[in-house]
Image (cartoon, rainbow, N blue to C red):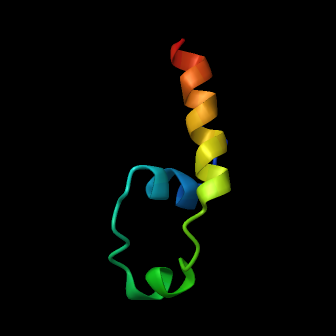
Amino acid sequence: MADAPRAVMEAALAHTVWNRTEAAYARSDLFARRRELMDAWAAYVS
């Protein structure tokens, strides 16, 4: 679980990126990678 990229974890938690420089590079919603993270979490908790 902890091997997911930080950006994917933050997006999955719907956290706002306050750092303007980092926010400028965070243009993708990372949907496919967030789905993988949520699938892994679902497998873990089931």
Number of callouts in the render?
A: 0
Q: Nearer the viewer, residue 18 or 42?
A: 42
Q: Where is 17 relative to 21, above or below? A: above
For residue 14, side relative to residue 12 (left or right)? left
Question: Where residue 25 sits in the image (x, y, percent)?
Answer: 56, 83
Residue drawn where x is 37% and y is 57% of the image: 14
Question: Where residue 12 sits in the image (x, y, percent)?
Answer: 47, 51
Residue drawn where x is 51% and y is 16% of the image: 45
Q: Nearer the viewer, residue 41 or 1?
A: 41
Is residue 1 in view from this perspective?
no
Residue drawn where x is 60% and y is 62% of the image: 30
Q: Where is 10 relative to 46, above or below? A: below
For residue 41, side relative to residue 32 (left or right)? left
> Based on the displayed image, in which of its 4 quarters is residue 2 positioned?
top right
Is residue 27 in view from this perspective?
yes
Q: Nearer the viewer, residue 33 or 2?
A: 33
> Based on the displayed image, in which of its 4 quarters is residue 28 positioned?
bottom right
Residue drawn where x is 60% and y is 58% of the image: 31
Q: Where is 7 relative to 1, above or below? A: below
Give the residue at the far top of this rendering: 46
- Quadrant of the snapshot with the N terminus: top right
- Quadrant of the snapshot with the C terminus: top right
